[in-house]
Image (cartoon, rainbow, N blue to C red):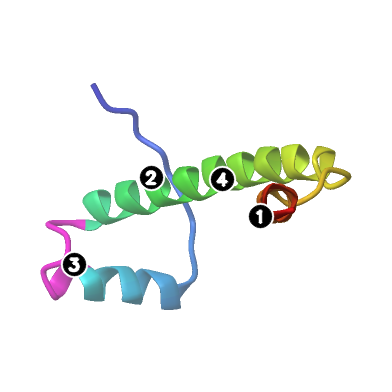
Amino acid sequence: MSVQVNIRTTPFLAKELDLVVKEGYFRNRTEAVNEAIRLLIKRYELSKIKASIESIREDTERYPELSDVVESMREEEDR
């Protein structure tokens, strides 16, 4: 099943869209626009994941770096 979505765009973008279709990257405008929408959604999903990771990272900044802990442990073992 598919849903029709009417969009308006600039003449430049329409020309570029037709060019990628003409060059054989996509069979038609619909396929090209659907790929663009998929990429847009993926970009936003990745930005949400990045924000989540940054939030977790910020919560751990007060802890020492793992490499510093390992180095300290080795120094203690060498004593």
List the single residue furthest toward the right: 62
Q: What separation in Å lies between label 4 and label 3 (alpha carbons)?
A: 25 Å
Towards the viewer: 8 or 26: 26
- Which of pointers 3 and 2 lies earlier in the amino acid sequence? 3
Q: Are marks 2 and 4 in contact (CB under 8 Å)?
A: no
Q: Are marks 1 and 3 in contact (CB under 8 Å)?
A: no
Residue 33, percent across and down?
33, 52
Residue 77: give x, y in percent of width and height: 68, 47
Going by the numbered disc 4, the residue's amino acid type is: Tyr
The image shows residue 61, relative to residue 21, as above or below, that is: above
Question: In terms of secondary structure, where does tag 4 sit?
Answer: helix
Could you tell me if the residues under marks 2 and 1 are in contact, i.e. CB atoms within 8 Å?
A: no
Q: Which mark is residue 67?
A: 1
Q: Nearer the viewer, mark 3 or mark 2?
A: 2
Q: Left or right: where does residue 27 sit relative to residue 52?
A: left
- Left or right: where 9 falls relative to 26: right
Q: What x and y, as percent, mark residue 58?
A: 81, 44
Q: CA distance from mark 2 to mark 1?
A: 39 Å
Could you classify mark 2 by the number of other residues whose Cα lies within 10 Å: few (under 14), some (14-19), or many (20 or more)? few
Residue under numbered circle 3: 21
Q: Residue at x 66, y 41 (%)?
A: 53
Determine the CA span between mark 2 and mark 4. Answer: 10 Å
Of tags 2 and 4, which is closer to the observer?
4
Element class at badge 1:
helix
Q: Earlier in the sequence, mark 2 or mark 1?
A: 2
Residue 44, numbered label: 4
* Mark 4 vs 3: CB contact within 8 A: no
Residue under label 2: 38
Instruction: State the SS at label 3.
Output: helix
